[in-house]
Structure formats: C-alpha cells, structure tokens
Image: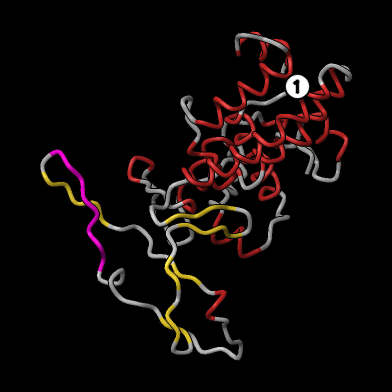
Amino acid sequence: AVVSTQSTGNPSKTKYIVYNPRIVKKGNAKSLQKSSTSTKSVCLDEKILERVYSIKFLGIIINSKLNWAEHKQYVYRKVSKSLGILNRCKNIMGYRELIAMYKTFIQSYFLYGIEIWGHDIRESDILVKLQNKVLRRMFDCKRSSDAWRISDDNILSLEGLYKRAIERLCMKHHYNTLPKYFADEIMPTKNDDPDDYGNGYTLRSKNKTCYDYSDLSINSNSILKHSCIKIWNKLPFETKSIPYRNMKLYALAGYNL
C-alpha cells in the first residue's frame, strides 16, 4: 500500500529491493524462482526505479536474501583496513595502550549494530577468523589460543560482545529507559510477578503469541526477543538488582550504559 504524504521522493536517489525470493529445488539443484513483483518495474514520478539486491541502511547492509553475509563482508573490509594501525603501534606501545587501540579501531566495528546481526555468529564465521588473526598480530603469536590467553579477558570474543550488548539492552529495558515503542513492540514483555525472584522475561508478547525458537526465521525481531529471554534470565540476580543510577557499580560490572 502507498501512503500519500506531503513529501516527494527523488527518483534518481531512490532504489527498491525485493525480499525473500523463493528457492525451488529441482532434484539436487536449486534455482531461484522470481516472485510476481520481481518481473515488474517500480516507478516514481513516471521514472523507473533501480532495483538493488543489497543496500546500506544506517550502517547495516541488508540484502534480498535477508541474511547477514554481505554485512559481515563489509565489517571484514573495514577491520582489515585498520589492522595496519595495530601493526605499526604494537612495537612502541605498552599492553594497555595496545588494548585501547584495539577497542577504538577494531572492536568499534564489531560492536556497531551487533544486537541485530550478532545472533548469526558461528565458530567458522569470517569475522571470528578475522578477530583471531588480529589478536595473533597484536601479540605476535602463531596460535590463536596463545593470543587469547595473553589478552587475559581484556578482549571479548564476538559471541561475548553480542551477549554483553544484549545484556545492556535488557538492563535498560528492565529499568524502563528504552523508548516506549521499542520496549512495547520489539522487546519481550517483562515478567512483573513479585514472587519471581529471577526477574525474568516471558516468551509471550502482548498479543499472547508464543514464540517457538525452533521455528524462528531470519526475522530479527523474533530472534532478538529470544536472545533477550535466553541471556537475561541467565544473569545473576545481584547484577539485575544494581540500582540504575549507580553508574560506578555498572562500570565495575561491565555495563557502561
């Protein structure tokens, strides 16, 4: 449906993307079956718009297959360009300064938008391999296990960064500091039962629809809810009960909100 507004679009700067094309199996081969909309042109002010298969939106690469492969490649290229800075600095900087450089020039790329795409991190992921490579370069190690040992928990793995980001998000939700729409529509509903010592979340949203993790798709909304439930409920009660305004305790616990 098209909604009429007072604003007008610029056809030369407007593109469109068709999401989730169907994959048809023919024996052992797979072929792409175009949807009914993929064969039609989309026009704006009587000008045909350019169709794209991936696009950057607020720094996140979204593609027509609704996976994060292209965004990971984008982050990979960004981090690879910053790797030379660490190579030049590692011989003239101390341990703490080198860690600070890593967090400034490398980890910042990993962290951006990780709440959205971080659930797709696997052990064989290109970004996991890249992070291992960065640490080997930093500490002049031949094996990744040695580099991680030298880091002495001062550097979090990608999985750890994703977990920490979700914990921060849940902490804000727990203390009602998220925007109302985001809290009501995106985040899972909180379990306000005073007898529940764990202060957990429930799998049921406001429309009482139960989310079955085994049936979740790439829909980041559903996956985000499940990640919040899974990660938040495992946090110790002492961490959940930190007063929101006590920023010193937050910093000690690693939650710099």
96 to the left or right of 47:
right
* Residue 197 visible in rendering: no
Based on the displayed image, in which of its 4 quarters is residue 167 positioned?
A: top right
Q: Residue 65's spot in the image, x, y percent?
A: 38, 52
Residue at 12% from the left image edge and 46% from the top image edge: 26
Residue reaching furthest to the left: 27
Residue toward you, 72 or 184? 72
Q: Quadrant of residue 87?
A: top right
Name the residue located 40 percent from the left edge and 57 percent from the top edge: 64
Q: What is the count of numbered marks?
A: 1
Position of the N terminus, as image quadrant, is bottom left
Left or right, 37 with respect to 167, comes to left
Answer above or below: position of 202 versus 144. below
Residue hosting label 1: 154
Can residue 62 be found in the magenta stretch?
A: no
Residue lying at 51% horizontally and 31% vertically, measured from the top left? 126
Residue 66 against residue 149 in the figure, above or below: below
Which residue lies at the image location 57% right of the left edge and 81% below the top edge? Answer: 10
Relative to 131, 2 lies left or right: left
User: Measured from the top left, where is residue 100 in percent x and y?
Assistant: 82, 29
In this orientation, which residue lies closer to the viewer: 195 or 249?
249
Instruction: Give the main secondary structure, helix, strand or loop, of the magenta stretch.
Output: strand
Magenta part of the chain? 28-35
Residue type of the residue flagged with mark 1? Asn
| Label 1 SS | loop
Quarter of the picture holding the C terminus: top right
